[in-house]
Structures are given as structure tokens and as C-alpha cells.
Image (tube, grey):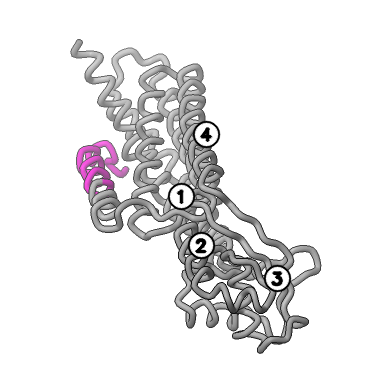
Amino acid sequence: MIPFVKFKWAAISLSIFIIVGAYYKTFYVFNGFSKGIDFAGGIKLEISLNDKVTIESLRDFFSNRSINAVVQKTDKGSANMAKIEIGGQEEKRLEEQAEKEKEALDKANYSINSVDYIKYLMLADIVSGDSQKIEFVGVDHVGPTVGDYLKDSAIKLLLVTLVLITLYVTFRFRFQFAVGALIALLHDLFMTLGIIGFLEIPLSIPVIAALLTILGYSINDTIVIYDRIRENVSGHDNIDMGKAINQSINESLSRTIITSVTTLVAVAAIYFLTDDMLKDMALVLIFGIIIGTYSSPFIASPVVLIWDKFAKKT
């Protein structure tokens, strides 16, 4: 039998060390989280791909022009297209550049803005002026106001999820179990966010969806262990809570390992076999599943024991 409870303070100390280190690098080295255009604002372009306009030629174009853009291949219906995302700061720089080249843009019948400036450059660089070879399917602009709204909505959604999960655990078990579950969920959320910042993964709507999925995955694993704890202490007034918790974790261990491994295999397949559009979300899920699996025996369960000991002393 593995003495999980014995390592509770070492596990808690390790978590604090990782979280502090990750946030230190995020805020003092990178000056905060990297943001996708969902939160930072910017422009999205959709372009049809053909023999001239390819993912490689688009990436080479933006690289050669020193334009910070994310180019991804996407299938929309039967069309083969590329999606291009350019952040708000880069969009402002392009607009300033368009103003400097106003005369050339006017001569080519283009408006003086970032999107038309990109179209003008692509026409010259990628298809050598052949307008028939390049087709812009869609152009969307995400303004700063929309980005702020999405950011506020994401924060509210995460908070509401935490509150609802805590209430659910309180009614299903006892308050001390709810405290353990809440601390474990906050641990998972902050540690995953720390890794997101450490790896400079841009915050976006898919990443927020991954965070919500991680919370659901983590609480599911925690509740399985809590069920075993409740069964093992039921009808035993003087039972050693530490031994009961340790026994419960070990009894749930095979189920935890099998579930985590099979889930990781599925998510890893998404990460390695799909295009860039899902890679960030899959990477966050991979780290989140590992963290959620770790927190159930090493954070959520020990908190129940610590609370129990504190309650008995008072």
C-alpha cells in the first residue's frame, strides 16, 4: 500500500514551488499572459488555398515581411482554406505602414487600412500580381471591447463553475470534503494557468474551454476517492481518518491510472495528429489531466485529513 497521506506536506510544498515559479516567469519575465486575438483584439482572415497560395507560401510571406501572424490550415465544408490571425498591436503597426505607403495603395485602388495593406502585399509577393489566384473568403475584426467582454465572461464562467462544484460536493458529502475539492480545483486552475503562462500559450476561447474541461475531469476523480473514503469511515466513529483516506486512495488507484492514461492517449492523438488550431487546447488538456490526477490524492484528500484533525482539536 502506497502511503499517500505521508507525503501530503511534500506534495503541497512542491505545488506551491511550481505555481510560484511559473507565475514569477509569467509576470516578471514575460510581463503577463500571452493573449490570442479573442482577448487582445485583432483581425482574422480566411483565404482559399491553391497551387500558388499554400500554407508554406503564406508562412514564408509573413516571415519575410516580419509580420507577427498565426497561419493555420482549416477545412470548412468542402473548401480547403487557411485561417490567419493577427493581433491588435500588429494590426496597428500595419495600419501605420499603410499610411506611409498611401500613394501606392491609392494607385492600386486599395483602402488605407491593415487588411487592404495585407491584400496588397500578398498580391505582389505570393501571386505576382495575378488577382485571380488569391481569394479572400472572410475577414473578421475583433475589437478591444469585444476582447474585454470575452475575458470578463471567461473569468465569470470559471468562478461560477467553481461555486457550483463546491455546492455539489457540500450537499453530496460534507463541508470538509467541499473545502478539499475547492482547494484542489483552485490548485489545478492556478497551476495550469501558470504552465500556460510559462510556455507562453496564448489565452483564447479554446484554452478557456480546456480549463473548464480540466475542472470537470479533476472533480470527477476526486469524487471517486471521496466515495471510497465515505464508505470506509461509515459506521466507524473512532476510525483513524489518515488510514481510511490512504486505503481509499489505494483502492481507487487502478481506476485513476487507467482513466488518466486512456484520456491522455486520446488527447495526445489530437495534439500530434491535428493541425495547429487544436494544438494549444490539446497541450493545456495534457498538462491539466496530469495535474488533476495528481491533485486528487495529494491535495484534495489530505485537506480533508487536515480539516478533520483541526476540527477534533477545536
* Numbered tag placed on residue 31 in the rendering: none
Give the residue pinned by disc 4. 157
Q: Where is residue 223 in the image (x, y as percent from the top left)?
A: 47, 31
Give the residue pinned by disc 2. 91
Residue type marked 3: Met
Give the residue pinned by disc 3. 81
Depth check, front residue: 95 or 239: 95
In the rendered image, the residue lying farthest to the bottom is: 128
Residue plotted at (78% across, 82% down): 132
Name the image quarter holding residue 242: top left
Residue type marked 2: Glu
Marks 1,4: beta carbons within 8 A: no
- Judged from the image, the secondary structure of the residue bearing numbered disc 4 is helix
User: Which one is closest to the eye, mark 1 or mark 4?
Assistant: 4
Image-based side of 97 in relation to 18, left or right: right
5 in the magenta segment: yes
- Judged from the image, the secondary structure of the residue bearing numbered disc 1 is helix
**How far apart are the two marked residues, 2 and 3, measured between alpha carbons?**
22 Å
**How far apart are the two marked residues, 4 and 3, measured between alpha carbons?**
32 Å
Chain-order first, disc 2 or disc 4: 2
Chain-order first, disc 1 or disc 4: 4
Residue 286 drawn above or below residue 159: below
Chain-order first, disc 1 or disc 3: 3
User: Which one is closest to the eye, mark 4 or mark 3?
Assistant: 3
Depth check, front residue: 236 or 5: 5
Q: Where is residue 76 in the image (x, y as percent from the top left)?
A: 74, 63
Residue 67 drawn above or below residue 289: below
User: Which one is closest to the eye, mark 1 or mark 3?
Assistant: 3
Q: Where is residue 65 in the image (x, y as percent from the top left)?
A: 49, 79
Residue plotted at (51% across, 22% down): 168
Q: In which quarter of the image is the C terminus?
A: top left
* Numbered tag placed on residue 289 in the rendering: 1
